[in-house]
Amino acid sequence: MLNSLGLPGRPQDTRVVVAMSGGVDSSVVAGLMKREGYDVVGVTLQLYDHGEAVQRKGACCAGQDIHDARRVAEKLGIPHYVLDYESRFKEQVIEKFADSYINGETPIPCVTCNQTVKFKDLLETAKDLGADVLVTGHYVRESISGNRRAMFRPVDLDRDQSYFLFATTQEQLDFLRFPLGGMTKPEVRELAREFGLAIADKHDSQDICFVPQGRYTDVISKLRPHAADPGDIVHMDGRVLGQHKGIIHYTIGQRRGLGVSTGEPLYVVQLDAEERRVIVGPAEALATHKLLLRQVNWIGSGELEDIPEDGLEVHAKVRSTRPPSPGRLFYKDGVVTVDLHAGEMGVAPGQACVFFDRDDEEARVLGGGWIQRAEREAEAEEALKALTGKAWEAASL
């Protein structure tokens, strides 16, 4: 006989560790587990300086959030632990975030946090606490598919967090549960009120937790002072148009705030970190159809090596705010590439490409990887090759 979490045994004999961020979602998850009679333990991570965090709004894992998580645990009558993960978070997330930016990439620290601190370190801590499962408030669904546990997009696609969880390994997925995947946000808030939780109407986190007011350049400049070194703004035809004050102030696809004028609309088309150059060009130079990925994680059926030579039809998502679009996934000699049928504009290295088997609420997450390079249209690719000396074929995993 299996309980509601798909495990043998009665709920009261099943220890559940809930990752409690202090927000509505994870608080409701703790309430649901308690109501169903599970042996619930709440765990909250302190990820950065507690004193600074108290004053920040719109961020997760801040001082007020820790206080809110503690109050929820008291209301529910469950034990609650606050774990100091500051040093791990700084090393695994913040430092890598800074290094990625100064290398001309556009990183996604929330994915890295899930990949390392939350679903690796916290998962091990949950096991040390005797947990049978680790439960979170993420909006994704999971269930058994064939002989393994699979991840699916949630019912509430407006809250879909699968893009940020692509790096979840099969071993981790087997130990995780996501009770909110079949609910909408209004339903979750109503449950919070039903449980009598004071955070029922609390706003969702908006900013990257360690970046106050979204000024990521301030954080990077503090960690890597040389990141603000000046350099040239160069047109992809070779003309030097002006100077910049650090490539960390620019992202692929950016048009505003370039500080140069040529009488034509210009966009950032590439960041040349080695030469400290911001390369600009026309909008059409941003178009790409082929992506080269690194550190690919596969949680689909079979193995990545089983993908046929002519590829696998997928729906690929290259930004959290955009819907998946049709494409084809290829695997050859350890190299993973994705061909996007309709193409994308302004794809940047360091972003994630996540693949699904379809494009609706029944879509299964097959995995994903970090974008190492985006191949442009032939004319733009040749111009960038002439300027930087780097060709698409030169890239490798």
Image: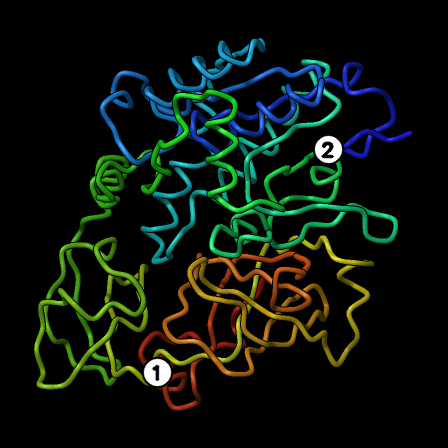
Give coordinates of residue 164: x percent, y percent.
52, 49
Query: For this rendering, which residue is in front, 281 or 37?
Result: 37
Crowd rating for badge 2 (residues with CA inside 10 Å; few <14, some 14–19, many 20+):
some
Above or below, 327 against 349 in this view is below
* Residue shown at the point (40%, 81%) measured from the top left: 287
Amino acid carrying mark 2 in the image: Phe
Disc marking residue 175: 2
Crowd rating for badge 1 (residues with CA inside 10 Å; few <14, some 14–19, many 20+):
some
* Residue shown at the point (74%, 57%) measured from the top left: 300
Give coordinates of residue 269: x percent, y percent.
31, 73
Estimate the spatial distance between the alpha carbons at disc 2 and disc 1, rounded to whole Å: 49 Å
Query: For this rendering, which residue is in front, 156 or 276?
Result: 156
Above or below, 157 against 28 in this view is below
- Helix, strand or loop at mark 2: helix
Above or below, 246 against 277 in this view is above
Instruction: State the image quarter where residue 54 is shown.
Output: top left
Query: For this rendering, which residue is in front, 388 or 17?
Result: 17
Kindly report which numbered mark, 2 or 1, lies closer to the viewer in this rendering.
2
**Which is more N-terminal, label 1 or label 2?**
2
Give coordinates of residue 85: x percent, y percent.
47, 21
Instruction: State the image quarter where residue 245 is shown.
Output: bottom left
| Pointer 1 residue | 386
* Residue shown at the point (51%, 26%) measured from the top left: 194
Q: Residue furthest bottom?
A: 379
Instruction: State the image quarter where residue 217 is shown.
Output: top left
Amino acid carrying mark 1 in the image: Ala
Q: Quadrant of the N terminus?
A: top right
What is the basis of the colouring in this image?
A: rainbow
Q: Quadrant of the C terminus?
A: bottom right
Give coordinates of residue 330: x percent, y percent.
68, 73
> As drawn, is 160 to the left or to the right of 128?
left
